[in-house]
């Protein structure tokens, strides 16, 4: 049937296996081929942004909970926390065009209201909320500027009313500035006559000014410009500053240098600047910060805002408003969208009560001996459904029931929290046996499919290889700071941090001691003649070998080798270089 979809939030389907896209329709356009396209504003889900931005979004949500008095996240169950993340969206300023035939239904998106409970979004179907703006190009998250400013930060504190006869001790000059006195000695006729004189002086001043004569070449245009509010404000302020003395005020209007010329923003801006402003207003709306940044950086924010409200009083604004109204009437507002009844490619075909191909595996069928012993739903673990849908990578052979499939398409996640989600929500580990935890970690490290919270993809990522390069100062510290840096004990406890502050302090002390005599990092090899002489003086003792005659009753004994006492074993049970060369006693 025909539906009015302009400025509505709708579901778009761009893939049969992915969740729906949530977009806001700005306008409907008919192409040359006769098809209807929708110009839409993009909304993004949590699964569409990076983990770093998700952490920022969670931090922002906690700040809102601390300021508000509504239901906090600690009062929610794990299932409610899981489903509430599926209702959160991120607004973007990005526009795109999508065919209207991909529309799959309407939904509702609202700015997060700090005064209502978040549970109200879970109680309503097809309802979403947003509080942050996502920039796809810059990959940033910002708070929406259209937030409801309610609270002590935005509302003024009203002081107590003064009693009769009580004096106000506040300094009035800091609170307000008096610019007009209604109890003046002048009559209304005299004030009007002075204002006429001020307009005449303004018209004459524009005739003398070269830039004004170019902008207002005719007398009528100069007189109209002189009758604007800026001229009247200057005249009334002059009267008040001169205590409503007409002769003194008139002399100030026409000083010795010539008549005073008062111009507002409408006169200060050139025609090209006005055109840029209208173009920027068409693109950004009343976002004056973006208008100034992208179109008019040489103008101040105050000047742009003042020009906007003056521009709304001109005929140019009225003409543009009429043109937009006529253009809106000519555009499409309703479009006929037939009921989408095509079968989804992810449907698992059934025949005689037996499930067919899972995940689109052509030529293979999943036929268990008992149909009830088939795979359960990955979300609700149901074993019976009138229709099954393949979900996830083909190698995982997962499927969803009809209810959970619709939830996946609309909200972009599984209906029930998975085991990995529960581990994130609960601070304590779910298993007490360390062997079970190590087995699960090994599965994750080996790349086995682990189901995550919403995406059908595997939660395991390929890790990059790396190596540790030891610096020369680290090698030197190992030799100097042996008393503090005990490498064997540190190697046995790899997860205990080394106290590098103590090592640095010991190195500083040892460096001061060894500044006169530098440490030798390597022992120099002595000549061969010295080694031969040392071996002649200290001959090596032969080991005593205990031998016994083999017997049938007693088992054969192993050889017992005596180790010389003057040698010390290294970490591998072998002699080091100095022992082999006989350099210990030299």
Image (cartoon, rainbow, N blue to C red):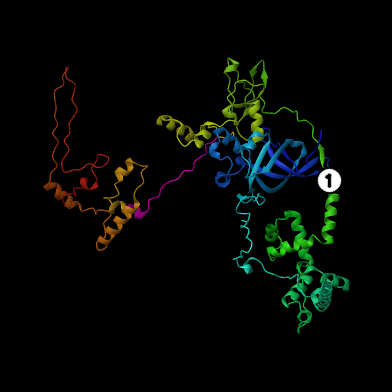
Question: In the rendered image of this protein, does residue 226 appear above or below residue 44?
Answer: below
Picture coordinates of residue 399 (x, y %)? 61, 26
Q: Nearer the viewer, residue 487 or 204?
A: 204
Residue at 84% x, 61% y is 315
Residue 203, located in which quarter of the rendered image? bottom right
Is residue 3 left or right of 573 when viewed as pictured? right
The residue where tag 1 is placed is: 331
Badge 1 crowding class, 10 Å Cα cut-off, few under 14, some 14 to 19, many 20 or more, is: few
Residue at 32% x, 40% y is 492
**SS assignment at label 1:** loop
Magenta residues (range): 457-476
Residue 379, located in which quarter of the rendered image? top right
Q: Nearer the viewer, residue 482 or 84?
A: 84
Is residue 541 left or right of 44 when viewed as pictured? left
Q: Nearer the viewer, residue 14 or 231?
A: 231
Taking the magenta stretch, the answer to whether it contains residue 469 is yes
Residue at 18% x, 48% y is 582
Picture coordinates of residue 528 (x, y %)? 20, 51
Q: Nearer the viewer, residue 344 or 252?
A: 252
Question: In the rendered image of this protein, does residue 546 appear above or below residue 207?
Answer: above
Q: Which image quadrant: the N terminus?
A: top right
Taking the magenta stretch, the answer to whether it contains residue 304 is no
The answer to whether residue 142 is visible is: yes
Is residue 403 left or right of 212 when viewed as pictured? left
The answer to whether residue 135 is visible is: no
Query: Farthest residue in the bottom direction?
Result: 256
């Amino acid at each position: 049937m025909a539906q009015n979809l302009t400025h509505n939030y709708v579901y778009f389907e761009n893939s049969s296996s992915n969740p729906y896209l949530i977009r806001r329709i700005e306008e409907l356009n008919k192409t040359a081929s006769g098809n209807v396209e929708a110009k839409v504003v993009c909304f993004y889900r949590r699964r569409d942004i990076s983990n770093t931005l998700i952490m920022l979004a969670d931090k922002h949500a906690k700040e809102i909970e601390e300021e508000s008095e509504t239901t906090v996240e600690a009062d929610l169950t794990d299932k409610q926390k899981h489903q509430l993340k599926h209702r959160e969206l991120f607004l973007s300023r990005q526009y795109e065009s999508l065919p209207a035939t991909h529309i799959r239904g309407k939904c509702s998106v609202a700015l997060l209201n700090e005064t209502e409970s978040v549970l109200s979004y879970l109680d309503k179907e097809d309802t979403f909320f947003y509080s942050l703006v996502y920039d796809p190009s810059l990959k940033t998250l910002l708070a929406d500027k259209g937030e409801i400013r309610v609270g002590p930060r935005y509302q003024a504190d009203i002081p107590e009313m003064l009693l009769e006869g009580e004096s106000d001790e506040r300094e009035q000059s800091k609170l307000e500035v008096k610019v007009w006195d209604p109890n003046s000695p002048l009559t209304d006729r005299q004030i009007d006559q002075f204002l006429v004189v001020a307009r005449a002086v303004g018209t004459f001043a524009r005739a003398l000014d070269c830039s004004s004569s170019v902008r207002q070449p005719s007398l009528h245009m100069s007189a109209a410009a002189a009758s604007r509010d800026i001229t009247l404000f200057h005249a009334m302020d002059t009267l008040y500053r001169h205590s409503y003395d007409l002769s003194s005020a008139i002399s100030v209007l026409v000083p010795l240098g010539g008549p005073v010329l008062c111009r507002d923003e409408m006169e200060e801006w050139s025609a090209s600047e006005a055109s840029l402003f209208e173009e920027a207003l068409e693109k950004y709306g009343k976002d004056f910060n973006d208008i100034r940044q992208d179109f008019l950086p040489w103008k101040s924010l105050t000047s742009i805002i003042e020009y906007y409200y003056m521009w709304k009083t001109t005929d140019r604004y009225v003409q543009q408003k009429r043109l937009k109204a006529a253009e809106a009437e000519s555009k499409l507002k309703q479009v006929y969208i037939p009921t989408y009844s095509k079968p989804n490619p992810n449907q698992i075909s059934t025949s005689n009560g037996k499930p067919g191909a899972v995940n689109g595996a052509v030529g293979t069928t999943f036929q268990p001996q008992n149909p009830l012993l088939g795979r359960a739903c990955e979300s609700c673990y149901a074993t019976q459904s009138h229709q099954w849908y393949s979900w996830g990578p083909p190698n995982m052979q997962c499927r969803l029931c009809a209810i959970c499939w619709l939830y996946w398409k609309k909200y972009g996640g599984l209906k029930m929290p998975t085991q990995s989600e529960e581990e994130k929500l609960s601070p304590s580990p779910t298993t007490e046996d360390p062997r079970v935890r190590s087995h699960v970690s090994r599965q994750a490290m080996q790349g086995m499919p682990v189901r995550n919270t919403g995406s059908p993809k595997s939660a395991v990522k390929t890790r990059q290889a790396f190596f540790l390069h030891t610096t020369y100062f680290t090698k030197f510290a190992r030799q100097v700071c042996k008393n503090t840096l005990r490498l064997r004990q540190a190697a046995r406890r790899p997860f205990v941090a080394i106290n590098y502050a103590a090592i640095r302090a010991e190195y500083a002390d040892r460096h001061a001691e060894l500044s006169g005599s530098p440490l030798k990092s390597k022992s120099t090899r002595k000549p061969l003649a010295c080694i031969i002489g040392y071996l002649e003086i200290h001959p090596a003792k032969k080991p005593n070998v205990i031998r016994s005659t083999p017997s049938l009753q007693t088992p054969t004994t192993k050889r017992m080798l005596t180790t010389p006492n003057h040698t010390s074993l290294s970490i591998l049970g072998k002699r080091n270089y100095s022992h082999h060369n006989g350099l210990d006693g030299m």
